[in-house]
């Protein structure tokens, strides 16, 4: 697993409180050669379950808290995580992240809660030791080596002097370079200022051009408005001369109105006197109106009573009209029968050789008692023993005055039926004993409504 920038979870847990026996580190060497990758082998015991954020760190011997790690790597979770057996795991540290000194270090397994679950034995990072080698050389080689050594020393001295000169030149160049850098910075600042000024000048120029255009437009508008104002002034001067003439007329009219005002004042005084009289008269009228309102209230009550009486009289009149219509029909029936009898009587008299005009009627003696009797013939009834005519009798024809329905039975037998039929055409008040013809339905509804007021 590669090392990440994220720091591992740590805590301030001390060594005395850690459980080092839960993770066991295997095959830990006494020292490791620098420059190569380091593989750490460890065993997870059956009583320990690793978690995702567990990590293994390299600590310098003598550490006190888990925050003192030198480097770390995240652990890889085993495939059979829930099995109860021990699990062999490994993690690899890259050479770039390993320590470069020869101090003693150790591996430590730290869980996600920052608790140390295992620690290894100490180890070092150092190269392998080399054995002493015996070198045998000759005198000539030694002299050559010494001569070469002298030359190298001379060259070294020359190099040192050249180095000093180069250092001095370098310092001078650095000083010049710093000055150049300062000048370059000043130049950049001046360039920025120049750009800013150019931009501001351009913006100001654009602004001035825009203002110039606006001023030109305003100037054109002002010129056109000035021309309009000149025309308007001429019009106003013409109107002024006209108004002066009208003013003279108004002054003359004002004088006339002043005279009229004096007349109106006099009329106003007269009207004020009339108004006073009218107010007195108005008070009298108000009193009269109040009296008339009281009378109107009494009249309304009287009108209601008269309306009720009118309804009663209308009902009685309707009944009288019904009776009159019935009697009139009876009279017409009797008149027709009388005419028929007269014609029959004339025929019979002519048949018997008698003159109808010379036949006189006699009144029975019972007429002296004041009771009205039917007229009888002097010579008796010529129809005695003869079958009666097929014409209906007086009481045999009755007609309803409302629907003109005929009742052909005798009055004594069907009088009750006729009265019931006639009453069926009337509307009776459910509150009082008044009745109205069916043609006067609106009057009947108004009458019933009066009872609910």
Image (spheres, helix red, strand yellow):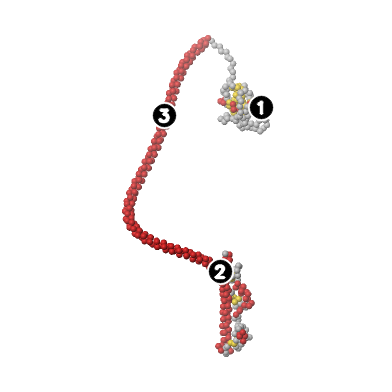
- Above or below 296: residue 231: above
Tell me the distance, in whole angstroms, between the alpha carbons under discs 1 and 3: 69 Å
Please give the label number shown on residue 439.
none
State the image coordinates of residue 331 (x, y, percent, origin top left). Answer: 57, 79
Tell me the distance, in whole angstroms, between the alpha carbons under discs 2 and 1: 125 Å
The residue that disc 1 covers is: 21
Please give the label number shown on residue 187.
3
- Above or below 421: residue 130: above
Tell me the distance, in whole angstroms, between the alpha carbons under discs 2 and 3: 122 Å
Please give the label number shown on residue 305.
2
Residue 231 visible in the snapshot: no
Mark toward the viewer: 2 or 3: 2
Residue at position x 58%, y 21% from top? Answer: 102
**Quadrant housing residue 193:** top left
Of helix, strand and loop, which one carries label 3?
A: helix
Q: Is residue 174 left or right of residue 370?
A: left
- Mark toward the start of the polypeptide (1 vs 3): 1
Are the two marked residues, 1 and 3, in contact with CB atoms closer than 8 angstroms? no
Screen quadrant of the N terminus: top right
- Above or below 195: residue 317: below
Of helix, strand and loop, which one carries label 1?
A: helix
- Mark 1 Cα within 10 Å, few/some/many (few <14, many 20+)? some
Are the two marked residues, 2 and 1, in contact with CB atoms closer than 8 angstroms? no
Residue at position x 50%, y 11% from top? Answer: 146
State the image coordinates of residue 348 (x, y, percent, origin top left). Answer: 58, 87
State the image coordinates of residue 328 (x, y, percent, origin top left). Answer: 56, 78
Screen quadrant of the C terminus: bottom right
Which is nearer the eye, 14 or 353?
A: 14
Residue at position x 38%, y 41% from top? Answer: 211
């Amino acid at each position: 697993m590669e090392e990440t920038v994220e720091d591992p979870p740590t805590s301030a847990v001390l060594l005395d409180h850690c459980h080092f026996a839960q993770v066991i580190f295997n095959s830990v060497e006494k020292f490791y050669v620098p420059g190569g990758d380091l593989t750490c082998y460890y065993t997870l015991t059956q009583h320990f379950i690793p978690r995702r954020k567990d990590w293994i760190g390299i600590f310098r011997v003598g550490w006190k808290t888990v925050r003192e790690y030198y480097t770390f790597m995240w652990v890889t979770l085993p495939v059979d995580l829930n099995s109860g057996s021990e699990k062999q795991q490994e993690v690899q540290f890259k050479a770039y992240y390993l320590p470069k000194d020869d101090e003693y270090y150790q591996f430590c397994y730290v869980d996600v809660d920052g608790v140390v679950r295992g620690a290894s034995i100490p180890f070092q990072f150092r190269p392998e030791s080399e054995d002493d080698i015996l070198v045998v050389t000759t005198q000539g080689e030694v002299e050559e080596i010494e001569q070469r050594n002298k030359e190298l020393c001379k060259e070294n001295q020359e190099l040192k002097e050249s180095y000093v000169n180069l250092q001095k030149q370098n310092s001078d160049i650095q000083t010049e370079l710093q000055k150049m850098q300062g000048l370059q910075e000043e130049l950049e600042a001046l360039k920025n200022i120049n750009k800013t000024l150019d931009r501001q000048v351009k913006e100001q120029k654009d602004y001035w051009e825009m203002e110039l255009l606006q001023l030109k437009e305003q100037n054109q508008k002002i010129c056109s408005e000035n021309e309009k104002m000149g025309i308007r002034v001429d019009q106003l001067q013409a109107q002024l001369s006209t108004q002066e003439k009208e003013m003279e007329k108004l002054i003359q009219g004002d004088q006339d109105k002043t005279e009229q005002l004096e007349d109106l004042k006099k009329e106003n005084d007269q009207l004020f006197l009339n108004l006073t009289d009218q107010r007195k008269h108005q008070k009298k009228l108000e009193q009269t109106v109040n009296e008339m309102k009281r009378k109107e209230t009494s009249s309304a009550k009287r009108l209601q009573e008269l309306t009720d009486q009118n309804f009663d009289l209308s009902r009685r009149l309707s009944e009288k009209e019904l009776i009159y219509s019935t009697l009139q029909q009876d009279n017409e029936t009797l008149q027709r029968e009388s005419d028929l009898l007269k014609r029959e009587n004339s025929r019979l008299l002519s048949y018997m050789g008698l003159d109808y005009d010379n036949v006189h009627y006699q009144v029975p003696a019972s007429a002296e008692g004041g009771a009205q009797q039917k007229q009888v013939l002097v010579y008796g009834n010529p129809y005695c023993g003869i079958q009666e005519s097929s014409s209906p009798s007086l009481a045999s024809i009755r007609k309803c005055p409302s629907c003109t329905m005929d009742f052909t039975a005798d009055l004594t037998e069907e009088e009750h039926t006729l009265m019931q039929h006639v009453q069926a055409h009337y509307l009776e008040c459910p509150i009082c004993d008044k009745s109205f013809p069916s043609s006067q339905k609106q009057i009947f509804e108004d009458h019933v409504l009066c009872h609910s007021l």
